[in-house]
Image (cartoon, rainbow, N blue to C red):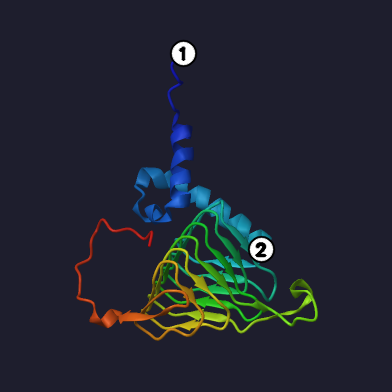
Amino acid sequence: MPAAKPTADDYIAQHKQRLSWMPWLWYRLKPKHLLWAKPWQQQIQAELQQLETVTIGDNCFIAPEAQLFGEPNRGISIGNQCMIAANCFLHGPITIGNEVSINHGCSLDGGGKGLIIGDQTRIANNVTIYAFNHGMAPDMPIYQQSSQSQGVVIGRDVWIGAQVGIVDGVTIGDHAVIGMGAIVTKDVPAYAIMAGNPAHIIGDRRDKPATKADSQQHSTD
């Protein structure tokens, strides 16, 4: 027998999956899609803010598969027009500015001192940021030693490529670019282009020619 024809509910369910993994599409939804999409997001965000110490700004998208955990004094604050994709893990304290995108599979933990992410920063998939470190003294197992935290600060308009790792104590300056797979262990100057393990400067954004905006470009990077 031929497969049953998909229903309107089937298409909506598939569209929700698409949005979860490609959340930049949220900002391209047509009015007919917003009729079901807005109530869906409102419910997800309202429940999250009731259950966790999390605040969410206006016109944000949070994938239902994302896991956000915030406790008193270790909350998560999300600015306006931010998007967090599927399979992300966020544990406060984290402060996220406006127009920030966090793509699928990222793992962010603010440790004791916190993680700050500036406005308009783009974080690609599978990025790992941990704002704490275990003790490593040789006279006892690592898991029994207390952790330390200095915090991590990421400036505005920073582009962090896929599978980047950022360790505790790092500050990344405004407008910097971190190349795919880089491991950032030291502070990054503003406008620097970084690559490698450990990451090192390979260029400066100010040396790049101006380009015309492409209306078809999306925010997966």
| Residue lying at 20% horizontally and 70% vertically, measured from the top left | 211
In percent of width and height, residue 35 lies at 43, 45
Q: Which residue is mark 1?
A: 1
> In the image, is residue 141 above or below residue 32?
below
SS at badge 1: loop
In percent of width and height, residue 46 lies at 59, 57
Residue lying farthest to the front in this orientation: 138
* Along the viewing direction, whichever of 136 and 65 lies nearer the viewer: 136
Task: Estimate how packed mark 1 is, as few (under 14), some (14 to 19) or many (20 or more) residues with alpha carbons within 10 Å.
Answer: few
Cβ atoms under marks 1 and 2 closer than 8 Å: no
Q: Quadrant of residue 155?
A: bottom left
Q: Which mark is residue 39?
A: none
Position of 212 with respect to 13 (left or right) is left
Q: Which residue is mark 2?
A: 52
> In the image, is residue 132 above or below residue 52?
below
What kind of residue is marked 1?
Met
Position of 98 with respect to 211 (left or right) is right
Q: Earlier in the sequence, mark 1 or mark 2?
A: 1
In percent of width and height, residue 89 lies at 59, 61
What kind of residue is marked 2?
Glu
